[in-house]
Image (spheres, rainbow, N blue to C red):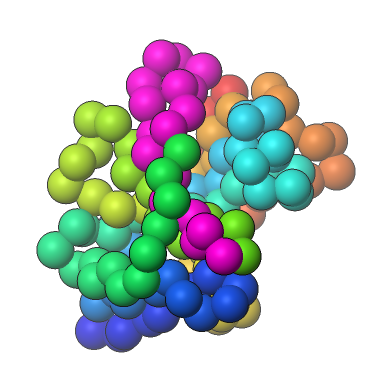
């Protein structure tokens, strides 16, 4: 099983994961676009027992488009989001794929909120697409 390390920009907050993600997805919702400063967010979901968090985080809770809450954990020093906890999925921890800084990370298998997708973005052809 692979071990991977996600980290904030300054290295103070980390999430070490053991094993492969159970899901890798890209989200085109406007909130993810604002949160990431990019045109979509990409995240990997891991079983909570496979994730070890180190460091101090600040939390921000956001209510999603469908009413569920997500608790984002970011570094209070550099501001990077390192992990988050979606309401209703308490058995899992989601980690932004960019926090791994690993170009060999598995591609997304799901693309959500595609009605808000920038038209030039092309998800992998085999990815499940959810409007």
Q: Quadrant of residue 131?
A: top right
Q: Quadrant of residue 27?
A: top right
Is residue 76 shown in magenta?
Answer: yes
Horizontal and vertical percent position of residue 107: 54, 63
Q: Is residue 115 left or right of residue 26?
A: right
Which quadrant of the rendered structure holds the N terminus? bottom left
Horizontal and vertical percent position of residue 109: 47, 52
Outermost residue toward the top in this view: 67
Residue at 30%, 85% in the rendered image: 2
**Residue 15 visible to an observer of this rendering:** no
The tally of labels here is 0
Between residues 57 and 113, which one lies in front from this camera angle? Answer: 57
**Residue 57 visible to an observer of this rendering:** yes
Horizontal and vertical percent position of residue 68: 36, 21
Between residues 75 and 49, which one lies in front from this camera angle? Answer: 75
What residue span does the magenta drawing correspond to? 61-77
Residue at 37%, 26% in the rendered image: 69
> In this rendering, is residue 39 above or below 57?
above
Is residue 63 shown in magenta?
Answer: yes
Residue at 52%, 59% in the rendered image: 76
Between residues 19 and 8, which one lies in front from this camera angle? Answer: 8
Residue at 69%, 39% in the rendered image: 33
Outermost residue toward the bottom in this view: 2
> In this rendering, is residue 115 above or below 72?
above
> In this rendering, is residue 94 above or below 119?
below
Q: Is residue 59 left or right of residue 126?
A: left
Horizontal and vertical percent position of residue 60: 46, 38
Q: Is residue 125 left or right of residue 38?
A: left
Outermost residue toward the front in this view: 77
């Amino acid at each position: 099983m692979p071990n991977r390390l996600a980290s904030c920009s300054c290295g103070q907050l980390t999430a070490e994961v053991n094993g492969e993600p159970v899901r890798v997805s890209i989200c085109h919702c406007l909130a993810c676009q604002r949160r990431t400063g990019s045109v979509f967010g990409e995240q990997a979901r891991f079983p909570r027992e496979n994730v070890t968090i180190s460091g101090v985080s600040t939390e921000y809770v956001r209510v999603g488009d469908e009413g569920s809450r997500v608790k984002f954990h970011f570094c209070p020093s550099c501001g990077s989001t390192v992990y988050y906890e979606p309401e209703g999925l308490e058995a899992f921890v989601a980690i932004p794929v960019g926090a791994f800084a690993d170009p060999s990370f598995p591609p997304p298998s799901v693309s959500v909120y595609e009605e808000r997708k920038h038209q030039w973005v092309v998800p992998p052809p085999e990815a499940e697409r959810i409007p």
